[in-house]
Amino acid sequence: MNQLARTNVLNLTTEEFIHPGNRACTGCGLSILYRIGLKALGRDCIFVVPPSCLTVMQGLFPVAATQMPILNCTFASTAAIASGVRAAVKRLGRETQVVAWAGDGGTADIGIQALSGALERCEDIIYICYDNEAYMNTGVQRSGTTPQGSLTTNTPFSGKSEQGKNVPAIVAAHNPAYLATCSASFPLDFHDKLLKAKQIKGLKYLHIQTPCPPGWGIEEHKTIAVGRMAVECGLFDLYEIDNGRMQLTGPSLKQLKQERLRPVNEYLQLQARYKALDVDQVAALQQQVDRKWAGYRQEFAIS
């Protein structure tokens, strides 16, 4: 297994690839990811982007928020289009990185068939899913990854009744060349995993939890804090799967030695989308997290 780089803010490139004045919302977690991701990828890349918040952020022709070529496509075709672009790049004898960058709706729901096909073919692309846990661009409708109990504009007043899809687990079942989970609140962890993905042949999948202030009902200045809390309470885990081997990374790895993580309720109560949860539902969610981490400690031989 290749080791992750250990980037710090002092050795990040100072070159910026996003122009000032883009159309992202105040406090947007995606804008953090995009800025850091472009620094890791460098100029020699082509983006394939379906309808999403990123489409809005990049602007309408002839305006562009970034300095890299972006090919906009339909919701369902992201991975297929990226596969075709990669074939063209290979035919030209170039090593340009082809990066599909889609939201959770365009990945877990509408685009999952094309993604599954690209995984089966082991296409040599990087696929990034920024997961803000709903269709935020079109008005905060529930998606396949929207968590159970979360309120959206098309859920009952009691919140979503179903559990969200575990998309990384679905991708892992395809045996990808590389898989990693990341958080917008730990941008250097994302940066290092993207650097690693660039060096690997085959399909590399990165799944990133991305706090959305208007969709989650949080204050704009708390984007980073809320995302960090999701990791610290054990609801969202940072890990990678390289050559079929899973390994926790960053803060999640350190948390293996903690007897108890932060209470889940500290994370939930900061977000208006969870206001419909009652005490029993919160307790049940805490039990799920406790069981998951007990399993991790057993799997990784930490008592």
Image (cartoon, helix red, strand yellow):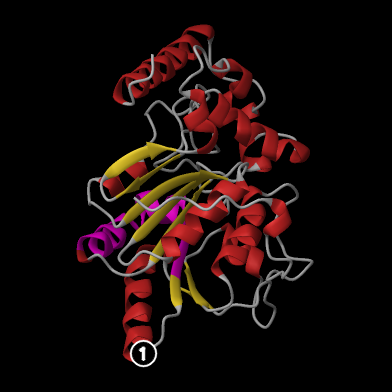
SS of the residue under disc 1: loop
Whether 144 is drawn above or below 283: the answer is below
Density class for disc 1 (Cα within 10 Å; few <14, some 14-19, many ≥20) is: few
Residue 226, above or below 31 = above
Residue 71 seen in this snapshot:
no
Q: Quadrant of residue 219?
A: top right
At 56% from the left and 55% from the top, the residue drawn is: 191
Q: Which residues are magenta?
A: 99-120
Residue 104: x and y in percent read 45, 49
Which residue lies at the image location 40% right of the left edge and 25% below the top edge?
161
Say whether residue 299 is visible: yes
Which image quarter holds the C terminus?
A: top left
Looking at the image, is 149 positioned above or below residue 260?
below
How far across and down, in percent of the image, does residue 61 sit?
A: 64, 80
Q: Look at the image and say whether residue 144 sits in the magenta stretch.
A: no
Q: Nearer the viewer, residue 141 or 222?
A: 222
Residue 249 locus on image (x, y percent): 47, 38
The verdict on residue 115 being magenta is yes
* Residue position for label 1: 93
Q: Residue at x 61, y 48 (%)?
A: 187
Q: Compared to 73, does 139 lie above or below?
A: above
> What predominant SS class does the magenta segment belong to?
helix
Where is residue 272 drawn, in percent x and y? 65, 27
Three-letter amino acid code of the residue under disc 1 = Gly
Nearest the eye: 102 or 177: 177
Quadrant of the rendered image containing residue 23: bottom right
* In the displayed structure image, the side of residue 120 where residue 148 appears, left or right: right
